[in-house]
Amino acid sequence: MKILVCIKQVPDMESKFKVNGTGNWYEETDLAFRINEYDEFAIEQAVQLKEQLGNEPDVTILTMGPERSKEALKKGLAMGCDRAVHILDEEYFNRDSFEVASLLAGFAKEGSFDLILTGMQSQDRGSGQVGILLAEMLGIPSVSTIVEFSYNDGNVELKRDLEGGMKAKINATLPLLLTCQMGLNTPRYPTLPNIMKAKKKEMTCLAASDLDHSSSFTTTTSFFFPEKSGSCLILDGDSSSNADKLIEILKEKTAVLS
Amino acid sequence: MKALLVGESREGILQASFYELVGFSKALNLETSTFLVGKESSLPTVDGKLYLADSDKYGDYNPSIHKQLLLDTIEKEKPDYIVFSHSSYGWDLSPRIAAAQKISQISEIIAVENNEFIVPACNSKLRRKVKPTSDVTLLTLQGGAFSAPENRNGSPEVISIDTSEASDSVGLKGYEMTPKTGVDLSKSEVIVSVGRGVGKKENIAIIEDLAKALGGDIGGSRPVIDAEWLDSSLQVGVTGTTVSPKLYVACGISGAVQHLVGMKKSDFIVAINTDRDAPITEVSDVLIVNDLKEFIPILVEKLGK
């Protein structure tokens, strides 16, 4: 079995963001980057399936992005993926979801992967399109936002997250692409021996220009902070005085403290 | 300009979020028609053509078949915009259409300015304005961003549609509800809700103390539920319970969109968060910029006096 995991490296969302000079993305300097949270569920699921099947599946981890993205691939290898592919691309933020998916498809179409796993969305762009687009471009079935996965002899049983506390139970067969939602599993921390082993694993680097791909159908015209509503009162004193003020406010504005 | 609105049906019932698509179209003065895989017994009350495929025959979730039915309808209607809710149905189906038609798609729209669309970025801390460059554009709308019209008494011209061209290897085998515990948060008057900022499971006790001191119930955001620090029936947000208590206290919750949509109708909202830029502040009345582990025990003590 061949498994592909598609990941993105994104800033830590607790970071202090700044808008870049061209006003269409964030300024990358001073940000700490990590694996997109949803993609970690995808890596974990791939590695769990590999373990379930006695180590037989070969797991490729793929990303597209600037040089820094290699760190995310290294972590994926240390979590248990077998090989990594980096589509080196400094212009990643000027490409829309369609173009990104077509680049990933440009790589994946030669690989005849049985199972492709990715996050339901990136934390920075957040369109939630790339996974499904990739599946459609490859002509394979796909299911989005899964919260449960089990595999048995070619058959896949899934649960999909729906609105209002409901889940859909889904059956599918390989080949298949799945996008992973929070709650699917608990991603492991790489152990030191596995971090050392990962250094010996294969990492291939490609350029976006090496791959057939489509152009974008949208452009970002501006990137900005939302205006503060102004109606939010900010209490930034010490805990004790803030507690006194809050009690006053609750007495005045709500009926919950009598 | 013409819009094709994509409705959504579950177990034969039209999802009410459809009317937000109607509200959006009215705001933009778009001429509309509707596509729905659903039941004759639960039709949207809108004017214009309604292309209806029977959900008994085509299911609630058969992505390839719904894609084919929708592509056939697009071919007939030739809309400028194809509009979905940014929901489990909409975000799953819309990219399939984008791939087939090779057209632009803009997801999770919260506002429109001069034919450009504003979407959240970086967990809602930032905004991105996006311009489509194809003639036809797919749009998914964030839940709650556009108001449903008050007047909902249109009557559609129903056109039944069928397809025999598609089949699906992916199939829906049924639904499962999260088991309910004793508490129904949708009826709570005071909710003290806990997010990832609480740090670890042991600290949940601090939040429970505050809920007790305020005479309310405890709830949680998705990461806390997924980490199994709280029972899954206590999740506040789109995939959990939508709430509107008299007082909502958000402790260590940054405010992912899915959470905000589920609680922003609360009468009074207090956020306790050390990050002044956290999106929760957009819907809050008061922000306490203190470490919740220090602040809450002091507040509880003072409330007890």
Image (cartoon, grey):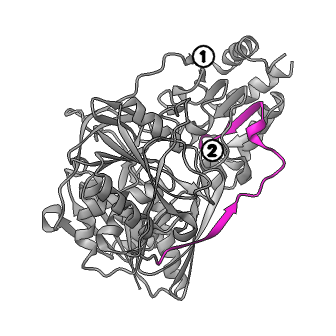
- Chain hosting mark 1: A
Q: Is residue B29 left or right of residue B38?
A: left
The crowd level at tag 1 (other Cα within 10 Å; few <14, some 14-19, many 20+) is few
Label 1: state its secondary structure: loop
- The C terminus of chain A, quarter of image: top right
Q: Classify 10 Å Cα crowding around label 2: few (below 14), some (14-19), many (20 and above).
A: many
Question: Label 2 sits on what residue type?
Answer: Ser
- In depth, the one of A137 and B103 nearer the eye is B103
Q: Residue at x 31, y 82 (%)?
A: A112
Specify the amino acid type for callout 1.
Gly
Looking at the image, which is closer to me, B225 or B147? B147
| Residue A101 point in image, percent of width and height | 29, 61
Range of magenta residues: B169-197
**Depicted B183 relative to depicted B10: above or below:** above
**Can you see residue B45?**
yes
**Residue A232: % across, % down:** 55, 19
Q: To which quarter of the image does residue A128 belong? A: bottom left
Q: Which mark is residue B221?
A: 2
Identify the residue at horizontal 60%, vertical 31% (top origin). B264
- The span from disc 2 to disc 1 (Cα, nearest Å) is 26 Å
Position above or below: A254 against B18: above
The residue pinned by badge 1 equals: A237
Residue A48: image location, x then y, percent: 53, 75
Q: In the rendered structure, the residue with mark 2 lies on which chain?
A: B
Q: Could you confirm whether marks 2 and 1 are on the same chain? A: no
Name the outermost residue toward the left: A209
Q: Is residue A258 magenta?
A: no
Camera sees residue A147? no
Residue drawn where x is 62% and y is 35% of the image:
B263
